[in-house]
Amino acid sequence: ITVDHVVDAQLIDVNGKLLNRASMGEDLFWAIRGGGGGSFGVILSWKLNLVEVPKILTVFKVNKTLEQGGTNVLYKWQLVST
């Protein structure tokens, strides 16, 4: 997930102040990455840590509801794929 690889961000808060990771503090940095509901300002830029994409990817679709054991199928796939 992309938000797990965010290393910095620039935003303008509700008071018009330009903030980056150092000046916004860890609580706001956590919140803008999806850790809290609400509007905290306008994101101007993100700095991301890029990761290498494997040459082979597996994609599949499971048509099961929770009642049909969809969660169990996903859990088993995670055991196999790691």
Image (spheres, rainbow, N blue to C red):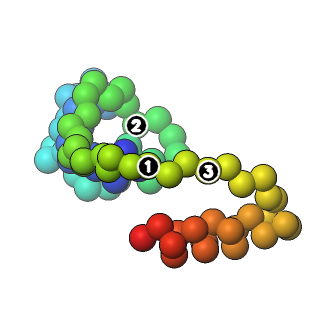
Which one is in front in this view, the residue at disc 1 or the one at disc 2?
1
| Relative horizontal placement of residue 2, taking residue 23 as reference (left or right) | right
Q: Is residue 3 in view?
A: no
Residue position for label 1: 57
Residue position for label 3: 60
Residue position for label 2: 40
Q: Amino acid at mark 2?
A: Phe
Which one is in front in this view, the residue at disc 3 or the one at disc 2?
3
Between discs 3 and 2, the one toward the N terminus: 2
Residue drawn at (51%, 75%) of the image? 79
- Front-most of 71 and 19? 71
Q: Horizontal and vertical percent for residue 41?
A: 37, 31
Q: Amino acid at mark 1?
A: Leu
| Relative horizontal placement of residue 20, taking residue 72 as reference (left or right) | left
Q: Are marks 1 and 2 in contact (CB under 8 Å)?
A: no
Residue drawn at (78%, 52%) of the image? 63
Residue drawn at (20%, 29%) of the image? 18
Q: Residue furthest left?
A: 22
* Residue 17 lies in quadrant: top left
Q: Residues within 10 Å of mark 3 (few under 14, many from 20)?
A: few
* Residue 75 lies in quadrant: bottom right
Q: Horizontal and vertical percent for residue 13?
A: 31, 31
Dot 2 falls on a residue whose secondary structure is loop
Between discs 1 and 2, the one toward the N terminus: 2
Q: Horizontal and vertical percent for residue 72?
A: 69, 73
